[in-house]
């Protein structure tokens, strides 16, 4: 497409990316990221779209951390090994933060645009912070023209 500002056939610059929504679903971190393609000459917004990102949560709870975390709510004499096993088996992740960073020319292909998405999660069993990353990429043609 032609850029309405400079009249040139657009070569897109580094896309603008913004996390719209994020969460956790079935032990996967998920996010909706708005990606805006801008003119490489003058930063005019030319195309945009929302891309779904997700990443598997890989995390192993440290036994000592689980025990320490349980002891913040359970008295030591009432804590058994079953409680530790149950905490790990029933663990849930809560997404506390999510950021996206522009990815230009993903995997060396110039017409792919996207983002590297980083989630910060908290594990309910051990209370530790977990960080996972995922990448999204789309061809310029997959985005809607901004009018
Ligand atoms: Zn332009
Ligand atoms: Zn854990």
Image (cartoon, rainbow, N blue to C red):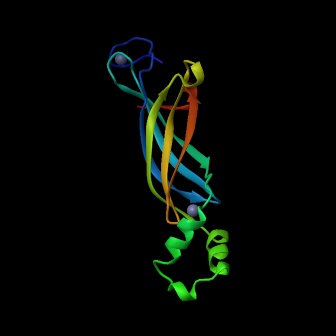
Residue 101 lies, with reference to residue 26, above or below; the image says above
Q: In the rendered view, would you say 124 is above or below 6?
A: below
Quadrant of the rendered structure where residue 66 is?
bottom right
Left or right, residue 29 beside residue 104: right
User: How many circles with numbers are drawn on the protein?
Assistant: 0
In terms of depth relative to the viewer, which is nearer, 97 or 18?
Answer: 97
Name the residue located 43 percent from the left edge and 29 percent from the top edge: 15
Visible in this render: residue 125?
no
Decide if residue 7 is in sight here. Answer: yes
Q: Horizontal placement of 45 versus 91: left or right? A: left
On the image, the x and y values in percent for residue 141 come to: 57, 26
- Residue 88: x and y, percent? 63, 69
Q: Is residue 74 above or below residue 102?
A: below
- Residue 38 or 27: which is nearer the viewer? 27
Residue 37 vertical position relative to residue 88 in the rendered view, above or below: above
Q: Which of 86 and 81 is in front in this view?
A: 81
Q: Measured from the top left, where is residue 59 in percent x and y?
A: 61, 55
Query: Which quadrant of the render holds ligand 1?
Result: top left
Q: Which of 40 and 141 is in front in this view?
A: 40
Taking the spot 59% from the left edge, 23% from the top edge, the residue there is 107
Q: Which residue lies furthest to the bottom in this view?
A: 78
| Residue at 63% in and 79% down | 83
Quadrant that contains the C terminus: top left
Is residue 140 left or right of 83 when viewed as pictured?
left
Q: Where is residue 126 in the image (x, y as percent from the top left)?
A: 54, 66
Residue located farthest toward the top when viewing the structure as drawn: 8
């Amino acid at each position: 497409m032609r850029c309405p500002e400079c009249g040139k056939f657009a070569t897109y610059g580094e896309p603008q990316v913004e996390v719209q929504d994020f969460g956790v679903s079935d032990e996967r971190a998920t996010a909706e990221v708005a990606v805006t393609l801008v003119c490489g000459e003058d930063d005019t917004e030319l195309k945009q779209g929302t891309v779904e990102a997700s990443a598997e949560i890989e995390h192993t709870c440290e036994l000592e951390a689980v025990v320490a975390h349980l002891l913040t709510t359970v008295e030591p004499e009432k804590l058994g090994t079953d409680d530790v096993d149950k905490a790990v088996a029933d663990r849930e992740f809560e997404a506390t933060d999510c950021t996206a960073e522009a990815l230009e020319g993903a995997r060396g292909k110039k017409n792919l645009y996207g983002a590297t998405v980083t989630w910060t999660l908290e594990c309910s069993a051990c209370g530790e912070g977990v960080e996972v990353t995922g990448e999204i990429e789309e061809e310029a043609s997959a985005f809607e023209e901004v009018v």
